[in-house]
Image: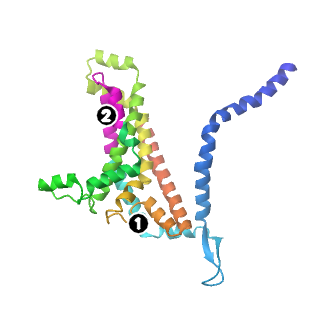
Amino acid sequence: MTSTTASARSRPRRTLAPYAFLAPFLIPFVLFTLVPVGYAFWQSLHKTARTGGTFGKTRTVFAWLEQYGRVLGEGYLADSLLRVLGFALVQIPVMLLLALVLALLLDSAVARAKRFFRFVYFVPYGIPGVVAALMWAFLYDPRLSPVVDLLRSAGIHADLLGPDAILWSIANVVTWTYTGYNMLIIYAALQAVPADIEEAARMDGASGWTIALRVKIPIIRPALVLTGVFSIIGSFQLFTEPQVLRSISTSVTSTYTPNIAAYSLASGDSYSEAAALSVVLAVVTFVLSSAFLRFTTRSQG
């Protein structure tokens, strides 16, 4: 009877133990992710109405899906979504390929000064996004840039801030910033590859590149999928780089990306419409990320 009572008392403790370990993650996640998302969704279902004529008081009223209809009816939404989608289709493969090559080079047996190069590759990610964008803005500005002057002296007239090049100038900044971050994720996965497998491949006569392509890359595929999902989410959150370049280039408009469009709406006191646009963007990002994850999982199987 005593052992049964003791077991019953210890059972709640065992039940609560996992939640105690998860609390440091769950509490900030609920407060700073779920609560803001829930509030944005609630706000997107309301609008500000004026009572008593032009000079009457304003109050918040329930509008159901009116704000979503207004957002989806705007032409800028499709244009901005297609713009960041094209950005992602080009920038993400280039960035992840560079990150993979750098990680494989660092993981090779002949690599030297690995800690130094890991630090060098990661430094761009440690620079605040606004600072990085300002630095590249200086290099893009035809009035100040030594790069543009050098190209001009070689007979190449490049307008890096023009409408045809600005998106890829932004892609260059993002690639420079996040390649080292993704490289570290891939490099950490490479460290988990069993040394016995690599040694067996070398004994079979496989070269370094063969081992990388046929052994290492298939094993670290989950890490590549993870960086791909992170990159898709980051692409649809594109804001800092185009917002900074907007101050020196007329090619970046107030609706250039969905995030900038939401910011512009909020700046104009259209909070409900901005919230609706944010929810739409979150749904689109979730759908595309899930589709990519499902596609890579299925192809792996």
Q: Position of residue 266 (x, y in %)?
A: 51, 65
Q: Is residue 202 magenta?
A: no
What secondary structure is marked by label 2? helix
**Residue beneath disc 2:** 102
Left or right: 173 as drawn, with respect to 10: left
Number of other residues with Cα within 10 Å of mark 1, as a class: few under 14, some 14 to 19, many 20 or more: some
In the image: residue 49, left or right of residue 154: right
User: Which color scheme does this rendered protein use?
Assistant: rainbow
Is residue 102 highlighted in magenta? yes
Name the magenta segment's main secondary structure. helix
Instruction: Determine which residue is flagged by label 1.
Output: 254
Q: Residue 170 at x, y = what percent?
A: 33, 54
Q: Which residues are magenta?
A: 93-121
Q: Residue visible at 48% across and 47% down?
A: 290
Distance between mark 2 and mark 1 Cα atoms: 36 Å
Is 18 placed left or right of 125 in the picture? right
